[in-house]
Every structure is written in C-alpha cells, then in structure tokens.
Image (cartoon, grey):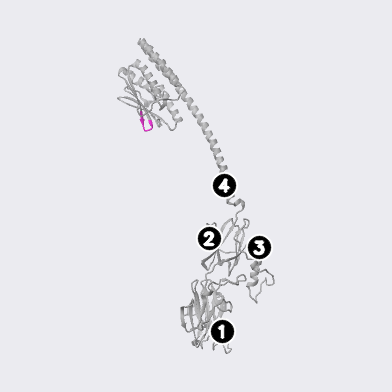
Amino acid sequence: MIDSQDALFKAPLKGEKIRAYYDYLENTSSINRNPGPAGEITVAIFHSKSVYPFTALNRKEQFKEDDYFVKTYGDGRKYMLSYGFLGGNGIAPLFDSSSIIVTAYGITQQDKDDFRFRVLSGKTKVLVPWQPIRFFSPVYMYGHFSATGVEYKEMAYLGAFNAPLGNDIIVEVKNIKNPESLSAVTAFWAKRSPEVIATFTSGEMKSFFEVYKYQWKYDFQQPRSTYYGDIKTRPPDSLLHLQKTFASFNRDLFFYLKDKVKSETLVEYNLVRNKTDSSGWVANSFDPNIIWLQQLKPGAYQLLLRYAFQRQTVSTYTFMIKPAWYQALWFKVLMGAAVMIALAFLIILYITRLQHKKLKAAAMQKQRVSTELKSIRSQFNPHFVFNALSSIQGLITKNDTAGAHQYLSEFSTLMRESLKGSDREMISITNETAILQKYLNLEQLRFGFRYNISVDEAIDDNAVEVPALLLQPLVENAVKHGIGALQEKGVLQINFKKEDDDLVVTVTDNGKGFDASAQTGGFGLKLTRDRILLLNNTLPLQQIALSFDKDEKGTTARIYFKNGLL
C-alpha cells in the first residue's frame, strides 16, 4: 500500500507501539556506497519476526534463494544482496504472512523531488513503477547525517508491502540527478518448517545441557551477557548427533530444533506411529528449541513438524524404537502360537469330555429306549398268542377239528419266525411281509376274507428295513374290527409305496373299523403308539408318523417313515 500512511508512523512517533507490531528492523546503505549530494540513502524494513534462523548452532546456513537475488545494474557489475541484521546490507528473510513497512533515511521534504522509488519482484517484474515520494515520518533511529553534517529529523515513508510464500519484494531508491546512486533492500517470504538437528535420550542429558548452554551463551550479542557467559563449553559439532534408531528402554526422547522461535507454541507437531496411529497436530509445550516426547512405545515413527504461522510447509523426521526381545515379532508369533496350541488343546479336551458325556448319556438313553422297546415288543408275543388261541378256540367251538389242527400247525411256524426276529429291532420288508402273510393265512382259516400285499417296484424290499412286527397290531385291528365280521366279503390291502426318499405303508380294509380319535383299537394299538414314540427319540432323522382315515368304504391305517429309503 503506497497510497496511504500507516498511523503508527505519523507524528508524534511512538516507538513502543511500533515495536509492539514491528519488532525487527533491517536497514541497508546504498549499494555502491557513493553518497549523493544529500548524503547516503539508507533504506529500512520494519517487520515482525517469529523465527530466528541464524542461531549460535546455525550460523552457516545459506538460503537457496541466494542465487535468485543476484542483480545486474547499469554499470554491468553484479552484486549479491547478502543477509543482514541490525545494520547490515541486503535481504530480510520472512517466514510468516505479516506485512513490512519500508522507509528511507537521507531524503527530506525539501529535496524529495530529486528522488524516485520503485518496487520489483524477482529480477524484472515491476510491481510499482518509479514514482515520487509522498509521505514522511519522524525518524525512528537517530544518528543519520547529511553530507553537510546535519542530522536528519524525518524519514521518507515508502509504503506497506506483502507477498505470498516463495516470493520477494525489492524496493529501490535512486537520485534522478545521480542515477549511479542506488539504494535497495529486499524482503522475501521463505518457506520454512522446523528441522531437527540433534536427538538426545534420557541417558545423554549431560550433552543435552552443554548444547543448551552453548546456544544461550552465544546467541546474545554484546553488550548483553548471559548467565553462561564465563562458562566453558565444547563446540556443538561434537555434541549434535542425529540418531534414527533407539533401544527399547529409550522411551523419552528430546528433539533439538535448528531455529529459535518467540514461543514454543509456535511449533506444532504430529507424531505418527506405524503409519496409522497419529497423535494429531498439537502445539509444543516444552521449550522453543526442544520437543520432548515421553513414554514412547516400540515402533516406526514419523515426527511431522510445522510452524503455526506457516502450516502448509511440513518437515518430517523419521526414527524407530526397537522392541524388547519380549516385544519382538518373532517372540509374539511364538507366544501366540503357544497360546493357540494350548487353547486348542484345552478346547479339544473340553469338547472330548463333553462329547464323552454326551455319548455316555446317549448310550444310556439308547439303552433305556432299547430296553423299553424290548419290553413293548415282548408284550406283542403274548398279545399275539392270546389272539391266536382265541381263533383256535373259535374253530374248536365250531367242531372244525381239521381247521384247528391246520391253524395250530401254521401258528407254530409263525411263532418260530417271530422268535427268530425277536432279538432284532429292524427287519427287511421281505421278512416283515412273510410274517404278515403267515398271520393272515391263519386268520383266513377262521374268517375266509381276501387279502393282498404289494411292494412298489422302486423299493428294494430285501435292503429296506422297518421295525420288526410294527405292522402286526394294525393288521390285527383291521381283521378284528374290520373284515372279521364280513367273512368272505372282507378285503384287506397292504401297500408299501415310495414317496421321494420316504416310505409309506398303508393297511386298508372295507370293514366298519373303529374310532381311532377316541384312542380305542385295543392293547396292541396302544403298544404300537408307545413304540413309535420311543423309536422317534432314538432316530431323530427318521421320524415315524401314524394316522388313520375312516369313511363309508372302510378304514386306512397309514404309517409314514421319513427318510425311510435312505
């Protein structure tokens, strides 16, 4: 801004207020040091400075922008604008976004028409062309004299300027009566971030304090003195070491920074462990030159650093804390494998014991069910014998001696077949139908009915098994309650059918039947239902269902064997 004057630089000038905003002053003499008729022109920059890059530990740094500021003037000579502080010549590096105020000593309101100034960027880009000086301010620093020895009481106010990071501003002043007399000052806004120049562990505190005392001793210039002024210290080069790998017991680390800053909170860091575990950006709270990280865990770290006033520029310092032997990957893998093996062993042991208990309980249950089944099956024989003897008694009552003898012969054969299968729970369909045929042949002698037993061709009757004598009570009920009273008109049909993987057996008669819903049908039917219930408990995947269907044409008993053909 060159069309107005900052209020702080208007009369009366108050230095303490200026220093509150602009705490640093850079001034330079004319480049060729040939003062004009009015005396040497001194151009000065007022600016604030948050970072002090040139410390006792960093006196030799050269900014990479040096070559950028080599300028060629009218006489063909090249000049390097060197870095100067507090009275030097050249460039003022800036690191934040604050503006600068540019003034010039050696110009008065009486001779201002003899002078012009302009503002450049880089070597050739003109930001403000040559123009006259419009504003003046009381002097900020006394001791500037004209060629005739008169001390100046005012200074030229050239304006307030700013530029983005990575750019510069060059302010040049010349006497139009003596073009060879040229004064200039340069400011550039440099990209900068904190840089680690040394690392210290808790076991290296002696070296750490020596470095700290060295910087305090030599950072101040005379006539200032410090507490460490008379203390002998070793050169810092022998103490500044960058370590990248630390032992597992070094969990507290000190990172010494190259620049000095006004406040430790102007330094921000983000500690990232193993590329994923991030602390987030936090302000430093220990010391302007030191970051102290405590209680670090083993792992690979990235220490990201930036200044609070220039957050877009970030530097990175990588380091690693080795794990202890018991924290190493091989040990964790070994211990993990051992724990997994032990856990697997315990699980297998527990499952084995649990399975053993289940098998024992299942065996006991199976034995109990088998005992009950045998008990129920043992009751079929006396029940069947009772029915057979009743039939024989009926033949004798009718004086049918020949029929009674034949019945008794058939009955003895049937009893032998029944006893052969009494020790087996399951028998093939072939054996079951053979026993049913013998029984029906006996009953035919008494009642004279007709019967038929059919097996689906898709069923292998020698391979497929059914519970022994399970159909016997159903057939007896069909004869007793159905076709027995019809004599020669009675018809009994027994069918074995395949439905997918299931077996369906139906016993159909054309008699009046009985009321199955009223749980009638005799002792044999009750035993059959009890037996089916026990069989379903024993074979959960092969359930058996019994149902009855009665109409005016007769009664059908239906036994459904789920998965009976598998």
Mark 1: few, some, or many residues within 10 Å (few <14, many ≥20)? few
Q: CA gap, disc 2 to disc 3?
A: 28 Å
Which element is circle 4 on? helix
Tell me if residue 291 comes above or below residue 170 in the rendering: above
Mark 4: few, some, or many residues within 10 Å (few <14, many ≥20)? few
Which element is circle 1 on? loop
Q: Earlier in the sequence, mark 4 or mark 1?
A: 1
Q: Residue at x 67, y 64 (%)?
A: 206
Q: CA gap, disc 1 to disc 3?
A: 50 Å
Tell me if residue 244 comes above or below residue 553 in the rendering: below
Determine if the magenta segment contains residue 565: no
Q: Which residues are magenta?
A: 497-502
In front here: 503 or 337? 337
- Res 14 visible: no
Tell me if residue 20 comes above or below residue 240 in the rendering: below
Q: Which image quadrant: the C terminus?
A: top left
Please report contact status of discs 2 and 3: CB closer than 8 Å, yes or no: no
**Residue at label 4?**
336
Q: Earlier in the sequence, mark 2 or mark 3?
A: 3
**Residue at label 2?**
280
Q: CA gap, disc 3 to disc 4?
A: 39 Å
Please report contact status of discs 2 and 4: CB closer than 8 Å, yes or no: no
Total of numbered circles in the picture? 4
Q: Amino acid at mark 2?
A: Gly
Farthest-out residue, front = 76
In front here: 36 or 80? 80
Please report contact status of discs 3 and 4: CB closer than 8 Å, yes or no: no
Viewer-nearest of discs 1 and 3: 1
Q: Which mark is residue 33?
A: 1
Q: Amino acid at mark 3?
A: Met
**Residue at label 3?**
205
